[in-house]
Amino acid sequence: MKWITVLVIWLAASNVLAQFGQQVGDTKGAVHLDAQQEKRALQSLLKLAEKLLVSAVDAMPADTFGFAPTDGEFKGVRTFGQTVRHLSATSHILAAAALGEEPLTDAGDEVGPETVRTKTEILNYLSASFAHLSKAIDAIGQTNVPVNPSPISSLKRRGGSLSIGSGVVVPCSGPMDRLSSTFG
């Protein structure tokens, strides 16, 4: 239950941040963060997300990582472990894109490596994805680090710094109406 709460909070927060970012981008005379302010804000958000997600995943018993509902509208959804792998793989893909790197070959089509199956392996993969995101955030403002646009978000290069265009995009699989009708 705790991981569901964290996931819902994470998705809701990302939606609010995306909407806020869009409003700020549309407002004349808005104060823009410089690269260092942007870097500190994103690092703080990343550390909070890492703390919440890693602790929620760690709290799940190992035997529940293969759980997925099988009835009704949720038939065919990812298991808990696959969902965490997906989040981690997508984070690796976004970080690699921001750093101008090739994505990890085992990230697959945002599904993550099939060899990562146990709770310990999944936690290690999740932690590595947060480290990769942290490296990308550390590159903000560095003119010697090539920053490429992300294949799945609105990251832009602006004067040698990485900026977020219309907000933070958090990877999410499945229809949002399903989530909101379940948790709303």
Image (cartoon, grey):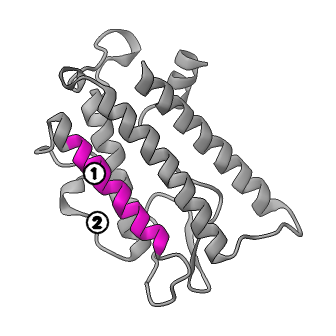
Q: Which residues are magenta?
A: 122-138
Magenta-span inclusion, residue 160: no
Label 2 neighbourhood size at 10 Å, few (<14), some (14-19), many (20+)? some
Tag 1 residue: 109
Q: Position of residue 148 (x, y in %)?
A: 45, 76
Quadrant including the C terminus: top right
Q: Give 136 or 147, whichever is nearer the viewer.
A: 136
Q: Is residue 36 left or right of residue 74?
A: right
Looking at the picture, which amino acid does disc 1 mark? Asp
Viewer-side label of 2, 1: 2
Q: Give 77 or 92, whichever is nearer the viewer.
A: 92
Magenta-span inclusion, residue 127: yes
- Identify whether 42 is placed above or below 80: below
Farthest residue in the top direction?
71
Q: Quadrant of residue 30?
A: bottom right
Residue 129 is tagged as none
Q: Secondary structure at mark 1?
A: loop
Q: Is residue 104 left or right of residue 88?
A: left
Looking at the picture, which amino acid does disc 2 mark? Pro
Q: Quadrant of residue 71?
A: top left
Q: Is residue 172 visible in the rendered structure shown here?
A: no
Residue located 41% across and 27% down the image: 3
Tag 2 residue: 103
